[in-house]
Amino acid sequence: MAATADQTLRAVASDETAVDGEGQAAFDRIIEQDSRIEPRDWMPDKYRKSLTRQISQHAHSEIIGMQPEGNWITRAPSLKRKAILMAKVQDEAGHGLYLYSAAETLGTTRDEMMQQLIDGKAKYSSIFNYPARTWADMGAIGWLVDGAAICNQVPLCRASYGPYGRAMVRICKEESFHQRQGFEILLELSNGTPAQKQMAQDAVDRTYAPALMMFGPPDGDSPNSVQSMKWNVKRFSNDELRQRFVDMIVPQAEVLGLTLPDPDLKWNEERGHYDFGELDWDEFKEVLAGRGPCNTQRLERRRAAHEDGAWVREAAKAYAARTAGRQSTELIGA
Ligand code: 3HC
């Protein structure tokens, strides 16, 4: 049977002996057809590096993101809330693992990525450098942070790199549950006593602007966006997604009976979108430079967890070596 055009293209892309020119042409065609690049396909170094950068930062965000919520597991107000929060924090750990696995297919090991994180050389999402002060922050994080994550990540399910796009499908399904549980926490507090409602409002006031910054700098200051969109990794710009998120949360805030802390927020009939105020980009830069409210604490906690877990990694390695030895003896015996 004759090979299809796609099969021929992929054969060239996967041919490790193909000279760069041929590989590049096959890569370009796959991108042009909005098809997927797989780990064994030829890809430009810049594509590999940029994806490793984005996916590893994303993985680190999931792992560091466990801290502000993990901190509230022992103080959840009921057994039901505790169980839900534990499940959510575990999901985040799982997301980190899918993402490290996807990044590993590009040639950097998980150990290397983890080392970059604990050495303070890797970025992770700015949002996780803010404290979670009250139980209501669990609601605001779920509603706004996971909500922003969904807005940003649903388009990444169509990212041109196969392992990343596929990991994102599962992650987005779980994020959707996370957002709903956050919304529900806020709804209950908002319909509770005046003090509970105030606690919910304070948490939303604290989380709103940092959540909007999760989408990254404004398009004019985003060095990676243009190329990333040409490669079909990002499908929308930072500002487009930020706008989409604002349009989504304004009616949700109304249902919650809470306000969003922005006096410039208003419907713009002409644009068909909500206008919103300028964000404090100096604060964003400070957080990225490691000077946010919790940067030091988050990294110290991560380092301590890594050191505390050393015996588990050693035991797992020793077990794997023993099992491999047993299997090869069995094979020889057979
Ligand atoms: N926090 C920290 N760093 C950020 C950032 C943020 N909110 N936004 C942008 N940056 C960094 C970029 O990583 C880049 O740094 P680098 O060039 O040194 O790698 C620099 O600022 C310039 O930004 P760009 O806009 O040029 O970068 P990108 O094109 O990569 O866009 C992004 C940034 C939108 C975050 C994109 O990388 C992305 O979509 N990443 C995947 C999603 C992700 O990582 N989300 C993090 C949150 S995960 C999460 O929320 C967990 C959930 O459980 C709640």
Image: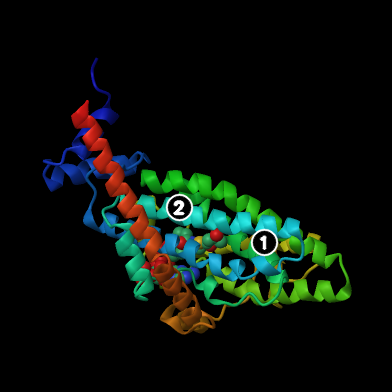
Q: Residue furthest top?
A: 1
**Frontmost residue, 210 versus 198:** 198
Circle 2 SS class? loop
User: Regarding mark 1 in the picture, which secondary structure is present there?
Assistant: helix
Q: Nearer the viewer, residue 43 or 83?
A: 83
Residue 195 drawn at (x, y percent): 84, 76
223 vs 130, left or right, is left
Pointer 1 residue: 143
Q: How many marks?
A: 2
Name the disc covering residue 235, or none.
Answer: 2
Is the residue 291 above or below the residue 37 in the image?
Answer: below
> N-terminal of the two: label 1 or label 2?
1
For ligand 1, the image quadrant comes to bottom left
Query: Where's residue 155, x and y in %?
Result: 50, 50
Question: In the picture shown, does residue 44 fall above or below 266?
Answer: above
Residue type, numbered disc 1: Trp
The quarter of the picture where residue 260 lies is bottom right
Q: Could you say where residue 99 lies in the image, as x and y percent from the top left?
A: 42, 53
Ligand 1 neighbours mark 1 (CB distance < 8 Å): no
